[in-house]
Amino acid sequence: MPQSLIDIVFVHGWSVTHTRTYGGLPERLVSEGSRHGLKLQKRHIYLGRYVSFHDEVRVEDIAAAMEAAVRDQKLGSTNRFFCVTHSTGGPVVREWFDRFYARKRKTCPMSHLVMLAPANFGSALAQLGKGRLGRMKSWFGGIEPGQGVLDWLELGSAHAFELNKRWIHEGDKTIGGNGFFPFVIAGQTIDRKAYDHLNSYTGELGSDGVVRVAAANLSSSYICLKQFGNPDEKGYSRLRKSAAATSASSALRVVSGKSHSGTKSGIMSSVKPARNLRGAAIDGDTVESIMRCFQVGTRRDYDSLVAQFAAETAVVQKNDQVEIEKRTLAADRTFIHDRYSQIVFRIKDTEGYCVEDFDLLLTAGANSDPNHLPAGFFRDRQANKIDPSTITYFVNYDVMAGSPEIPGVRAKLEGTRSLGFILHPRPASGFVHYQKCRIRASANLFQAVIRPNQTTLIDIVLTRIVHKETFRIERTSKQRSFKNARPGKETTQ
């Protein structure tokens, strides 16, 4: 990296109302800079602030305001700046880059984006609603959040789906060069003292209590399945893959012992302003990982760090797989921190209409049977409230793929080697309806969809069947009622 002074912009998460949210991280990075050959000074630190607690404010609005702020401060006019974000700050900056630079093919004034626990694919908590989230003081600061930002953050939101779909197809051209170097640093520890007993998502394994590792990671995939052919003997037509893409490998570092927020283990707010024995012990991996991101200067550097982070993440997730919670007046509890996968399904028809009423089943085995899936693989399913045609599944990758024995905790898991889908859409009859369909379980589909610590976006396109009796022209002058007309047997597709 060049030795010139570097501007660092910090961008906070959602529901924040004070820049103290950054805690000691800015000061700590300045003090650590010289140890890593970087010239960092306090006068080159910029603390971003944006309003997220008004309903009318959307992520796109914040991105537009960020562009104006970057211009006002003339950031990037001499040297391109680095950016460090937390939580929703990650999607905000990505939306800014996509809207003002990627689509316009312009050189971005930001060269490095280090995202701490970013909700890149949303958060399961967002659906709870702003009133309930506002009461969860341990996690969101007790501030009444804005609905506009929550709509983006809800799992499967249209804006998040499209932003991530573009990243999957074009991210490789974005990394480095006129784009930027993206990094994700995330924890998967639950702060048990801040656990909300009325909301299981705050203790969800595979997450930091707010954001899933799979939803933070930019490495992701996209698949489009289209319905075709005549029904088989059981009345199912087939789903066939019509498009598929996998993103460039992005840097992901899972750090041990970090939750989403809080001064004890929060990935950002627990960082101490100066190195000391205690501070180095509790936040060393986070700070060290950020500094290593800052040192990347070329695509070769980046790809090397991607591999290093992947190896280190594998070690962390293996070492932290078993957690034993010691309790004074009750029996100890054991938690198994497996790796998880997230799948976002979006169901539409050939005319582009959303299909909101359906049953979607995962299948496995030679007979593509839902009963052949491994016991305990399923963690969560959540339909998007604004667009019920989009539904997100959260599954245990290690249970699905199989896992070695954990002595004294869990026997060896065989898992499965195949995956398929069965879809029962509605309406299934009438003048306009849909036909049930499926794609048989296969090893190829499993490998394409179920990936550890990652999200896969899947578009399913159904044939919209319109019966001919919906519109008839008859050669007759005789008038008669067609109030009780029936769809008839013939259809046009």
Image (cartoon, rainbow, N blue to C red):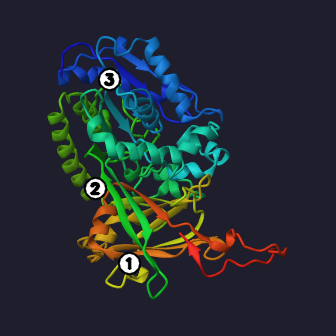
Horizontally, is 247 left or right of 92 in the view? left
Find residue 27 and report its image quarter.
top left
Hey, what amino acid is under mark 1? Leu
In the rendered image, residue 261, in percent from the top left (x then y), is placed at 46, 41
Q: Earlier in the sequence, mark 1 or mark 3?
A: 3
Pick whichever, 105 or 430, lies toward us.
Answer: 430
Q: Residue at x 62, y 33 (%)?
A: 53
In the rendered image, residue 365, in percent from the top left (x then y), is placed at 33, 81
Outermost residue toward the bottom in this view: 233
Query: How crowded is the residue under tag 1: few (<14 C-alpha within 10 Å), some, or many (20+)?
Result: many
Query: How crowded is the residue under tag 2: few (<14 C-alpha within 10 Å), some, or many (20+)?
Result: some
Horizontally, is 2 left or right of 349 in the view? left
**Which label is found at residue 373?**
1
Q: Which residue is mark 2?
A: 317
Pick whichever, 362 or 459, lies toward us.
Answer: 459
* SS class, disc 2: helix
* SS class, disc 1: loop
In the rendered image, residue 31, in percent from the top left (x then y), is placed at 28, 21
Q: Residue at x 34, y 12 (%)?
A: 77
The CA span between labels 1 and 3 is 47 Å
Q: Give the answer, above or below, for where 91 lies relative to 344.
A: above
The CA span between labels 3 and 2 is 37 Å
The answer, for residue 224, to whether it is visible in the render is yes
In the rendered image, residue 155, in percent from the top left (x then y), is placed at 51, 52
Hey, what amino acid is under mark 2? Gln
Horizontally, is 204 left or right of 316 in the view? right
Pick whichever, 273 or 29, lies toward us.
Answer: 29
* SS class, disc 3: loop
Q: Nearer the viewer, mark 2 or mark 1?
A: 1
Q: Nearer the viewer, mark 1 or mark 3?
A: 3
Q: Which residue is mark 3?
A: 107
Q: Earlier in the sequence, mark 2 or mark 1?
A: 2
